[in-house]
Amino acid sequence: MTRRSKITRKTKETNITIVLNIEGKGISKINTGIRFLDHMLELLAKHGLFDLRVNAKGDLDVDQHHTVEDIGIALGDAFDKALGDKKGINRTGYFVFPMDESLAIVALDIGGRAYLKFDAIFKREKIGDLDSGLVHEFFEGFVNHLKANLHIKSIDGRTDHHKIEAIFKAVGKALKIACSRDKRILKELPSTK
């Protein structure tokens, strides 16, 4: 059983389509209108081994907020839908990712409750063409719609580019672990409740 989903999110500000295959090979085709965000989503897909297509059109002439947040929301919906009843998944995952001088620690629980702890400070207002303050908003939308706890901690780093890159790579790795199925519990929910 391949776990796939297709999500379309259309609002007054954005029009987003996401196609996700959890059992992928890390192949992605991303077009958000924000090239640095494209790159980060490519990294998340590659390190999570998810096949991911994202096509987003947003009111970038106003600013990036709606587009970035809505992509996070749609991606959370895509994972939630692809995971279905969540039977047999590991549910939790964590990863510590070094990226040159940067280090990110990520812990994730796809347990039905949304919570984001985001501990990262960026010195620059923009990283490439992405408003750095919107990285938090992306992950906030993501966890609220995946219904997951996500803790992100940027431990060290000289460059904001590397800090954000380490975060997205670590999230991809943690997601891969959490979404993976354990053949011993394929018919069980990963919960004692």
Image (spheres, grey):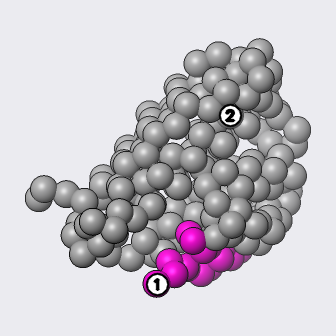
Closer to the observer: label 1 or label 2? Answer: 1
The disc at residue 166 is: 2
Which picture quadrant has residue 24? Answer: bottom right
Q: Amino acid at mark 2?
A: Ala
Give the left or right position of residue 145, taking residue 38 as reference: left
Q: Secondary structure at mark 2?
A: helix
Q: Amino acid at mark 1?
A: Met
Mark nearer the N terminus (1 vs 2): 1
Q: Any magenta on residue 18?
A: yes
Crowd class of label 1 (few under 14; some 14 to 19; many from 20; radius 10 Å): few
- Which residue position holds label 1? 1
The x, y position of residue 65, in whole percent, is: 69, 50
Which picture quadrant has residue 158? Answer: top right
Residue occupying the point 77% across, 23% down: 100
The x, y position of residue 2, in whole percent, is: 51, 81
Q: In this rendered view, identify the residue nearer to me: 57 or 115.
A: 115
Q: Quadrant of the C terminus?
A: bottom left
Residue occupying the point 13% across, 56% down: 192
Q: Which residues are magenta?
A: 1-23
Q: How many marks?
A: 2
